[in-house]
Amino acid sequence: CSRLSTAFSSLPKQASSSPSLPQPRHDMKRNFDSMLLSASPPTITEPSDGGAIVTNSIAWSSDEPSKASFSLSLKPEKCLEGDGTFRQWFCFSAGNLPTGPSSTLNFTIEDAGSSTFSDWNGYNVCCTSDMKNWTRITSTSFSSDTGKLTWNIVDNATPILTFAYFPTYSLERQDQLIHEACQTTHCQHKILGQSMDKRPLHALVFNKHVAVSNPKVVWVQHRQHPGEVSASWFADGVVERLLAMSSTSPPSPLLTKAIVIVVPNVNPDGGVRGHLRTNAVGANLNRCWGRLHGIDECPGQTDPPAPEVEAMIKGMREVGGPDVMLDIHQDEEKPYVFISKTPLGVPSCTPALRALRENFHEVLRRRNKDFETPGKVVPVGYPEPQPGKANLNICSAAVAEAFPGCLSMTMEHPYKGNDNGGTKDAEGFRIEQCVQLGKDTIDAVEEVLPHLIDR
């Protein structure tokens, strides 16, 4: 050991290959005031699920940090019909916002007047500070002359706010709805197919209490147009009512005499992308249903066909076609709930089916205060097509013609508020109204069940 010690001590010393570490400086002061606590420029970001906006500019100065102005534009989405784009849906978060007394935030969507549906009169922007509770910004104003949609917030209380065309409903929340429903054991879970981006197309099937040999089939589907988000909140009400009906003893007549199939989201890809009307590649799914009748060239169709619609068609055929089909949508300009007259124009429409439809309308009018209460806005809904001239590329018409006798309906909800309902309802269609409408619609289906046409 002594020899080794002597030998190594005589070797020349080598420079260390490791970099020397800086010595701590005990006199260094951390400047929190400049790094974290001083006012920072406001930001605009798009949420990963449903975000869509174009930021033109943000006006803000550290010399006047209590004020900020945001110039924005609608984000175009690809579509395979019309002029090749839709522009309507928006969802974004504004961060680093001035807060406190005298703080002022001004927002402008510069091109609202050239959006796909350009009548923004009576519309109020939706806002949330916690992603749970949504309010309407009643300072919202639209100028038909400039095409600008503007709103402002004074005495702002929180440094981050999220704004949207309608209160958002995420895929995470959808998954929660499906899991919670299935935990009750009152329904089955089926995957009907996959979207263009390989997302599952879920269905909840309520068939465990059927007590007849030839049950009716009720099919309720939501969000073919992904930015029509009221449909998802409506689905919450539908599922809640069906679970309640399943829990009674004995179960409700609807569930003993019918199979109810609920598709929460036909177009998950479009929803994640922040689209109003199209799927991942620009297909308007509610113009892709002509394949039920061998119509290969459809406005908005994809090539190959949209897998989302193909999955719905396959599912309907497997159960022999629905006896009631509800396709839930949202209208950008009309301030009330209504059901489209389009299926009345299919070649197979009969007086009996027309009477059944009117019966359903009367039942739902009685049960729900928001259904078909147009006030000053007339006529209700869209014009009825000429006999035999309905567009069979549209879902409700295609289903009505493919399965004669089916009460096939497109239900439209508003984004705007209804002046007939008082001050609160006039601000804009609310989540709780969507949920209640879903419950009341299922009750209405149960009431007309004895009158459905045998197919």
Image (tube, grey):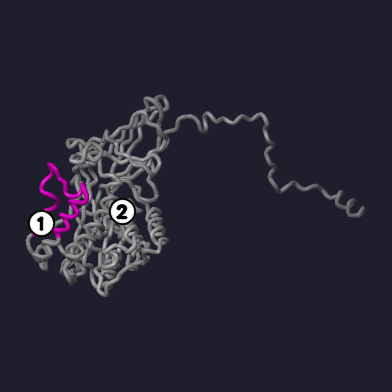
Q: Amino acid at mark 2?
A: Gly
The answer to whether residue 280 of the structure is visible from this angle is no
Give residue 182's position: percent from left, percent from top. Answer: 40, 62
Q: Which mark is residue 384?
A: 1
Magenta span: helix, strand or loop, mainly? loop
Rendered residue at 21%/55% (across/down): 411
Q: Amino acid at mark 1?
A: Glu
**Front-lying residue, 221 or 301:** 221
The CA span between labels 1 and 2 is: 29 Å
Mark 2: few, some, or many residues within 10 Å (few <14, many ≥20)? Answer: many
Rendered residue at 23%/43% (across/down): 416
Rendered residue at 23%/54% (across/down): 84
Mark 1: few, some, or many residues within 10 Å (few <14, many ≥20)? Answer: some
Is residue 180 magenta-colored? no
Side of 78 where 391 appears, left or right: left
Q: Which residue has dot 2 on it?
A: 237
The span shown in magenta is 357-385
Q: Is residue 113 above or below residue 439?
A: above
Rendered residue at 37%/25% (across/down): 102
Looking at the rendered structure, the secondary structure element under dot 2 is helix
Give residue 233's position: percent from left, percent from top. Answer: 31, 51
For the view shown, which residue lies furthest in the bottom direction?
Answer: 213
Looking at the rendered structure, the secondary structure element under dot 1 is loop
Q: Is residue 183 above or below residue 367?
A: below
Which comes sooner in the sequence, label 1 or label 2? 2
**Front-lying residue, 351 or 395:** 351
